[in-house]
Image (cartoon, helix red, strand yellow):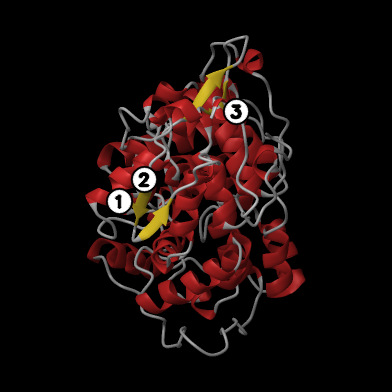
Amino acid sequence: MDDFATIQQSPPEAATSPPEAQSTGVFPVVAPHRSSSQSWKAALALLLAGGTLTSCGRLVGGGKTPVYSGPFGRHEATHLLRRAAARGNASEADELATKGLKGAVESLLETPDLPTEEDPGYFGKEFTRYTHEWVNHWLNTSTPLAERLTLFWHGHFVTEASKTNFWNTYHKINKLRELSLSTFKDLLYMIAADPAMLIYLDNTLSTKKHPNENWARELMELFTLGEGHYTEEDIQEIARAFTGWRVTIDAGRQYHYFDFSARDHDPDPKTVLGHRVHRRYNPIFEGYDVLNILLGMRQTYLYIGEKLLRFFFHPEPGREMIEKGADVLKGGTVRDFLYWLFTHPDFYSDKVRNALVKSPIEYAVGMLYAAGRREVVDKLFFRIRDLDQDPYNPPDVSGWPLASMEWLSDTMLINRLKFIGIVTNDSSSGTPQAPVDYSVFMDGGVDPLSLIAPEAQLL
């Protein structure tokens, strides 16, 4: 087996994508909405009560998927833009409205605008520049939905740069952006061999003598099936299947890349979720066989679909929406899933509008954009950090809360209110580079003073 002593290789031929797919690519109208104090009170009350949204009186499962057929003017386009992109202005909402519902959704779901990937020397030891780069890209990109979706995937496939090396996580984020609208299979294949993930969950230390179970556990509990759908034996067997998956550092010792050591791989047969896994002559394929087992289970799509709905739709989406969303995701791409959601009648329900809480990064990007700022100067960047979300260092492997009231502690709210004054009034933070317009950032937002209303915290 010396021929397999060290194998640097992509997913197996059996995969939908060609073997090299994971290592290629760019990276290895109507009147303005009337503000209503009752609308935000109802939304916050529903969030606080943990209310469950059923399908707003429409059947979701089975038969033809319903499509929203009501008016689609600035009011509806504003909701779509804010929810999809977390940034925008009235003219952009009006432009979406002129496209009609389907045209508007298709334009938001265009192929992600990918920035040039810089090498580690570009950032030096100024680690804050990584976040600075992401925020500035979000403010200027032609595909802002891809940035909110990338934030979701980064919070799902968590790595912490403090452990993995900042550039490795930066590269992971770039790959997530590139594949953000692809199939879940593409995303899972990529992340399994991602250097940041292999380092973060200690799979680089996993050998046949000492299998490390961290990746195996989180693969099922957090990344695919969800808690309670596997056994401890499944964790142990998956850990054995992924022995030998490791990283190698480049000659300049600046970043890592994936490789596979057959000498460290456990060659004996495994049983995962009732399936036999054994590749005597192609041991690297055992890891991908495990991924394919998980990708073949409906529970994976129920779990991922529900998380996407909680992030883009409502904190309690209801079983019918989850079931239908799982069908769409399993049979297609993330783009298909979001197209289904953004054209669904329930997405435009009053119960769904302003039903999610902005994370600090979404709040910062939306406010900066509304205030006409397209570049984060140093002073503003350090104020963004005060909002208590470091996008390169999620709090733990479970990621950030999904658009929930957890973001609105007393301290966080005070810091958000301070941020309003800094962004809108402080000339030392730079001058606006674009028109000032708060109408998408917040329903009824007309000036900085109006942003103290609770609607400013909602998507």
Residue 166 drawn at (x, y percent) = 51, 23
Q: Which mark is residue 269?
A: none
Residue 182 drawn at (x, y percent) = 63, 55
Q: CA distance from mark 1 to mark 2?
A: 6 Å
Is residue 303 shown above or below 194?
below
Q: Nearer the viewer, mark 3 or mark 2?
A: 3
Q: Which mark is residue 3?
A: 3
Q: Residues within 10 Å of mark 3 (few under 14, many from 20)?
A: few
- Do callouts 1 and 2 mark residues in contact (Cβ within 8 Å)? yes
Return the residue found at the far bottom: 63
* Residue behind mark 1: 234
* Residue behind mark 2: 238
Give the secondary structure at mark 2: helix
Question: Of label 3 and label 1, which has the lower sequence position?
Answer: 3
Residue at 38% x, 54% y is 454
Residue at 34% x, 58% y is 273
Q: In the image, what residue type sits under mark 3? A: Asp
- Do callouts 3 and 1 mark residues in contact (Cβ within 8 Å)? no
Q: Is residue 407 left or right of residue 333?
A: left
Relative depth, front residue between 429 and 364: 364
Determine the image quadrant of residue 430.
Answer: top right
Return the residue found at the far front: 1
Is residue 256 shown above or below 302?
above
Q: In the image, what residue type sits under mark 2? A: Ile
Q: Residues within 10 Å of mark 2 (few under 14, many from 20)?
A: many
Residue 86 drawn at (x, y percent) = 55, 51
Q: Nearer the viewer, mark 3 or mark 1?
A: 3
Q: Residues within 10 Å of mark 1 (few under 14, many from 20)?
A: some
Q: CA distance from mark 3 to mark 2?
A: 24 Å
Relative depth, front residue between 449 and 145: 145
Residue at 45% x, 58% y is 293
